[in-house]
C-alpha cells in the first residue's frame, strides 16, 4: 500500500446561519495536510467539528455539537465547543472586588456566576479571519460593563490546525481597566467518534498532584488538596467509570479543577485520554495552572446533537484549561486580574493520534 499523498491545507468559509440578533455567522473549515477537518464557528468562536483517524485510519468526529447553527443557538446548549469568558468557571455569588470597588455579576448558576454570565463569550458572534491555510483568528470586543465586568476588553482567540493533528489555541486579551479574565474552550469530546455513546470506558491520566476541593455549589474551599489516596488521583491511566461512584456528586461525576504539576507558565503536558476501542488518543498541553475535568454530568439526553444523537449523561468529557474557579475571591490562588498595559496570553494544545 502506498501512503496517501499529502493534501494542500486550506480554509473554506461558508455560511453557518444567522444569530438571534440578526448577525450573520460564518463557519471556517480548516483541512490539514492529512485531509482531517476542524470547523470553527463565529458563534462563540466554537469548535463545531473535529475529525481525526482511529488506529485503522477511519476518520471520525470526536467533538460534541450540532449539525446546524440552530442547535448551538438553542437554550439547552451546554457550551458545546465554545470559548467561555470573560471569566470561565464559577465566581461565588457573582461578586468580587478590585482596588476596593465591588462588582456584581449575574448569577446564572444557582447562587453563583458561571462562564461569563447570561450572555457570555460563548453566545457572542466573534469576527473571524483566515490567517493563511491552517489558521483562523476570532476577535471580540467586550465593552466596559459587559455582564457586569469592568473595562473594555479586546479578546482574540487563534486556532491553528497542524498537519500532525494538533489543534493549538492561543488566547490574547487587553483591557483599559483592571478586570478578571479567564478564557477557556469548552469542547466536549468522545474519542470513539460515535455520538451519544458513553465516555466511561475512556482511559484518563491527569498530571496533577493536587486538586481544588469544592463546596456543594462547586465553589473552592480555598485549599489545594493532595490527590493521593482520593478518587482524584489520576496520575496513572485510569478508566473514567472506575472512579465515578467514589467521586460522587449530584449529578455524579468529575467536575473538578486539577492543579497541573510543574506549573510555570510554560506549555506542558496536563492530561491524556485514550479510547481503547478506536485507539484514538488526545493529549492536552497548556500554559495554564489548572484544568477542569468535567464528565458531562449534567447531560441528560434532552440535547439532540450531530446525526440526531441524544447526548445522555457521560456521553462527552471536557478538559477545560484555566485558572482555578472563583480566583477573584481567593487570595491564595494565582491572580486572574488583567491590568491596562498588560497582555493576557495563554496557549492550549489538543493533540490527537491513534495507538
Ligand atoms: C462546566 C461546569 C459544569 C457545568 C458545565 C456546563 O464544566 O464546571 O458544572 O456547568 O460547565 O454544563
Image (cartoon, rainbow, N blue to C red):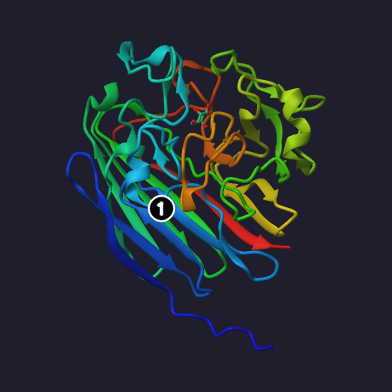
Residue 308 left/right relative to 339: right
Which of the 4 image quadrants contains residue 292? top right
- Rendering coords of residue 288 (x, y %): 54, 39
> In this view, which residue lies farthest toward the front?
308
Which quarter of the rendered picture does the C terminus lie within? bottom right
- Rendering coords of residue 177 (x, y %): 26, 28
The reply to whether residue 226 is in sight is: no
In this rendering, the answer to whether 325 lies above or below 273 is above
Of residues 54 and 205, the one nearer the viewer is 54
Other residues around mark 1 within 10 Å, as few (<14) / some (14–19) / many (≥20): some
> What residue appears at the point 41 percent right and 29 percent down from the top-left corner?
115
Q: What element carries label 1?
A: loop
- Rendering coords of residue 212 (x, y %): 63, 24
Residue 335 left/right relative to 211: left
Of residues 129 and 12, the one nearer the viewer is 12
> What residue appears at the point 36 percent right and 48 percent down from the top-left corner?
45
> In this view, which residue lies farthest toward the bottom?
2
- Rendering coords of residue 109 (x, y %): 43, 19
The reply to whether residue 68 is in sight is: yes
Question: How many numbered circles does the render carry?
Answer: 1
> In this view, which residue lies farthest toward the left?
22
* Label 1 lies in ligand 1 vicinity (Cβ under 8 Å): no
Q: Mark 1 points at which residue?
A: 67
In this rendering, the answer to whether 139 lies above or below 39 is above
Residue 97 left/right relative to 162: left
Which of the 4 image quadrants contains residue 125? top left
Amino acid at each position: 500500500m502506498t501512503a496517501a499523498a499529502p493534501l494542500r491545507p486550506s480554509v473554506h468559509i461558508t455560511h453557518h446561519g444567522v444569530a438571534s440578533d440578526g448577525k450573520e455567522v460564518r463557519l471556517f473549515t480548516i483541512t490539514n495536510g492529512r485531509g482531517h477537518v476542524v470547523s470553527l464557528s463565529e458563534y462563540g468562536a466554537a469548535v463545531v467539528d473535529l475529525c481525526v483517524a482511529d488506529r485503522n485510519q477511519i476518520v471520525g468526529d470526536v467533538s460534541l455539537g450540532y449539525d446546524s447553527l440552530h442547535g448551538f443557538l438553542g437554550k439547552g446548549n451546554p457550551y458545546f465547543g465554545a470559548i467561555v469568558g470573560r471569566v470561565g468557571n464559577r465566581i461565588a455569588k457573582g461578586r468580587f472586588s478590585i482596588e476596593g470597588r465591588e462588582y456584581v455579576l449575574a448569577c446564572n448558576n444557582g447562587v453563583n456566576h458561571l462562564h461569563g454570565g447570561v450572555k457570555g463569550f460563548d453566545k457572542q458572534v466573534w469576527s473571524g479571519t483566515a490567517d493563511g491555510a491552517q489558521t483562523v483568528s476570532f476577535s471580540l470586543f467586550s465593552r466596559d460593563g459587559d455582564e457586569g465586568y469592568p473595562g473594555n476588553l479586546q479578546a482574540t482567540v487563534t486556532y491553528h490546525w497542524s498537519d500532525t493533528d494538533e489543534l493549538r489555541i492561543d488566547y490574547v486579551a487587553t483591557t483599559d481597566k483592571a478586570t478578571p479574565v479567564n478564557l477557556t474552550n469548552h469542547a466536549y469530546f468522545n474519542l470513539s467518534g460515535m455520538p451519544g455513546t458513553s465516555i466511561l470506558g475512556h482511559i484518563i491520566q491527569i498530571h496533577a498532584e493536587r486538586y481544588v476541593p469544592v463546596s456543594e455549589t462547586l465553589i473552592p474551599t480555598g485549599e489545594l488538596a493532595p490527590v493521593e489516596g482520593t478518587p482524584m488521583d489520576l496520575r496513572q491511566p485510569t478508566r473514567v467509570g472506575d472512579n465515578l461512584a467514589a467521586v460522587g456528586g449530584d449529578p455524579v461525576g468529575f467536575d473538578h479543577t486539577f492543579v497541573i504539576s510543574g506549573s510555570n507558565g510554560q506549555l506542558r503536558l496536563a492530561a491524556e485520554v485514550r479510547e481503547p476501542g478506536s485507539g484514538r488518543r488526545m493529549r492536552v498541553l497548556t500554559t495554564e495552572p489548572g484544568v477542569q475535568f468535567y464528565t458531562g454530568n449534567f447531560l441528560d439526553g434532552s440535547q439532540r446533537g450531530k446525526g440526531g444523537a441524544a447526548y445522555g449523561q457521560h456521553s462527552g468529557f471536557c478538559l477545560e484549561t484555566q485558572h482555578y474557579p472563583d480566583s477573584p475571591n481567593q487570595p491564595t490562588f494565582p491572580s486572574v486580574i488583567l491590568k491596562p498595559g498588560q497582555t493576557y496570553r495563554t496557549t492550549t494544545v489538543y493533540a490527537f493520534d491513534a495507538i
